[in-house]
Image (tube, rainbow, N blue to C red):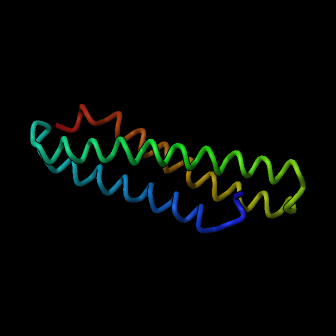
Amino acid sequence: MFCRLSDYDFCSNLGQDIMEKINERDKHARTSSAYTKLSAQIRTKSKQFNSDLNRLKQNLMRASASYHVTQREVERRQRMMDALITKEKQIDGALKNEGQSR
């Protein structure tokens, strides 16, 4: 369940790690082995991030629907989710711009 802040922190840190890897990858030539290796790591981590984010969304909906948490707590958690969703959009945007970087 979304009860643990560590689940959110893990997902948030994973998103940050992905962005750092994208920035690192973009410093290399597209044809280099470093670029290819980083791209593979980014794809794997991105899938994990999306999976974790979806799990957190589902857990929040369940907690909200079952009234296990107050409305105020639901709103606080939703703001946290919004930050992760923004991070997801940033990652998607950076990956879509991959072909335009070099």
> Is residue 62 or residue 72 the one in the foreground?
62
- Residue 46 position in % (x across, y down): 42, 44
Choose top left, top right, bottom left or bottom right for residue 30. top left
Q: Residue at x 58, y 48 (%)?
A: 53
- Residue 41 position in % (x across, y down): 30, 47
Q: Is residue 24 left or right of residue 85?
A: left
Vertical placement of residue 30 versus 28, above or below: above
> Is residue 93 or residue 14 the one in the foreground?
14
Q: Is residue 56 left or right of residue 28?
A: right
Q: Residue at x 63, y 68 (%)?
A: 5
Q: Count the labels in the image.
A: 0
Q: Residue at x 26, y 42 (%)?
A: 39
Residue at the extreme bottom of the image, as rendered: 5
Quarter placement of the C terminus: top left
Quarter placement of the N terminus: bottom right
Residue at the extreme right of the image, as rendered: 67
Choose top left, top right, bottom left or bottom right for residue 3. bottom right
Vertical placement of residue 101 versus 63, above or below: above
- Residue 66 position in % (x across, y down): 88, 51
- Residue 71 position in % (x across, y down): 86, 59
> Is residue 71 or residue 47 the one in the foreground?
47
Q: Residue at x 37, y 52 (%)?
A: 18
> Is residue 95 or residue 58 the one in the foreground?
58
Q: Is residue 71 left or right of residue 45?
A: right
